[in-house]
Image (spheres, rainbow, N blue to C red):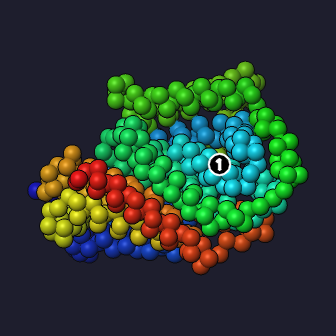
Amino acid sequence: MNAVEALPAANLIWGFNPQIVATAIVVVCYLILFAEKLNRAVVALLAASVMIISGILTQSTALQGIDFNTLALLTGMMIIVNIAEKSGMFQYVAIWGAKKVHANPRGLLAVMAFVTAFFSAFLDNVTTVLLIVPVTFQITEKLKVNPYPYLILEIFAANIGGTATLIGDPPNILIGSALNLSFMDFVYELTPIVLVTMLVIILIFDFFWGKHLVTNAQRRAQVMKINAADAISDKSLLIKSLVVLAGVIVSFILAEKLHLANGTIALCGASVLLLLYTFGNSHEERDKKTADIFALVDWTTIFFFTGLFVIVYGLEETGVLKMLGNYFVNLTAGSISKTMMLILWVSAIFSSAIDNIPFVATMIPMLKSMEPALGGREAMMPVWWALSLGACFGGNGTLIGASANVIVAGLAQRKGQHIGFIPFLKWSIPVMLISVIISSLWLYIQYFE
């Protein structure tokens, strides 16, 4: 007896086929999400509620579908980043990098891109651009150079850099948790591709923009006068944050030997840093600082993930995703290499137009259902890495392809620097295509040559 047959028939709305009902709920939910007319957390939670009310899932089975490891990892890292940000450490690195290239506009283009990519590998992309973009405007204004190429490249760097690690982008967190992959699994498999892709994209930008990025010695001297140390607002907090961040990263690397889940490590690190951040304060100040940090957690994203897990689990329980998996297996004639390429390009194209989080959340159980027919988990790993690369790199395809893109456009608009949807496509589509082509070649050479 399958999971659908086990559900009380009376609970299924109007006696409709549960696969049709589950599919309809998900399609309507995704259409509303795509239209961006309502808050995405509200939409996901409502869809999850309908999935239960309709009888597709019960409350207990719905809870089984929620990946609490992912939620714990997201929440813990958000807390750590929000506390560390208050020390000024991220702005310090950006200014330090600009001075290392002696405020040369062309060198600055590469530095800001690599700094953005590096931070995105460990922070969420939105936080990264919120920290980097103001520094970019500060430096380009002093140099009197056009900030546009810097901003566009930072968008691309945020999405590419986030691909490098387990915690760099939500799709990787989803995939890593679902497959029980370690931090180092992502570093070994994806970081080389990210480094090569970043280098290629930076060289392309330098070729097209480098000759236009010109300033004079006086303006460069103004940038060199900026004291990077002034960006550090709390040296004590900086030290505490660095120690905890280092401990968390090392624990991620050793997670398998420590027999700890990534979510546990992140929440433990968040708890320790919260303790250090509030230690020694009065009762009122301690409670206020803790409440302020909790308020900075992106609860919209947390509840969005929660609802999303439930509705995708409804598709899984009704057999819809297994049916789609069988279709993909037949489409590629059971070939791993063809499946890998198909998933890579489909993921990139879809993720450039819609939020890659619901896309990846839907693809994970579908790909899991394909594993027995394609030789098991080990044989399917190229396909899983293709899903990660396609979903993350696809975010560069359009201005709405990733949250970081929209945030940068909004910050730029406030400074009078308009980033239009169509002009952005002139850069974003080639960058996405180049990134995915590099990924295709890399994966094919690594696994099938």
- Residue 269: percent from left, percent from top: 53, 30
- Judged left or right of residue 286, residue 67 is left
> How many marks do you count on the picture?
1
Q: Residues within 10 Å of mark 1 (few under 14, many from 20)?
A: many
- Residue 153: percent from left, percent from top: 61, 60
Residue shown at 64% from the left, 41% from the top: 82
- Judged left or right of residue 335, residue 413 is right
Q: Is residue 73 above or below residue 402?
A: above
- Work out whether residue 269 or residue 381 is closer to the camera in this orientation and state it: 381
Residue shown at 39% from the left, 37% from the top: 184
Q: Quadrant of the N terminus?
A: bottom left
State which quadrant residue 11 falls in.
bottom left
- Work out whether residue 193 or residue 215 is closer to the camera in this orientation and state it: 215
Secondary structure at badge 1 equals helix
Residue shown at 86% from the left, 47% from the top: 221
- Residue 309: percent from left, percent from top: 38, 55
- Residue 41: percent from left, percent from top: 51, 60
- Work out whether residue 319 or residue 328 is closer to the camera in this orientation and state it: 328
- Judged left or right of residue 116, residue 320 is left
Kindly tell me whether residue 86 is visible in this rendering.
no
- Work out whether residue 315 or residue 330 is closer to the camera in this orientation and state it: 330
The residue labelled by disc 1 is 111
- Judged left or right of residue 143, residue 54 is left
Residue shown at 69% from the left, 37% from the top: 89
Kindly tell me whether residue 206 is visible in this rendering.
yes
Q: Is residue 325 above or below residue 97?
A: below
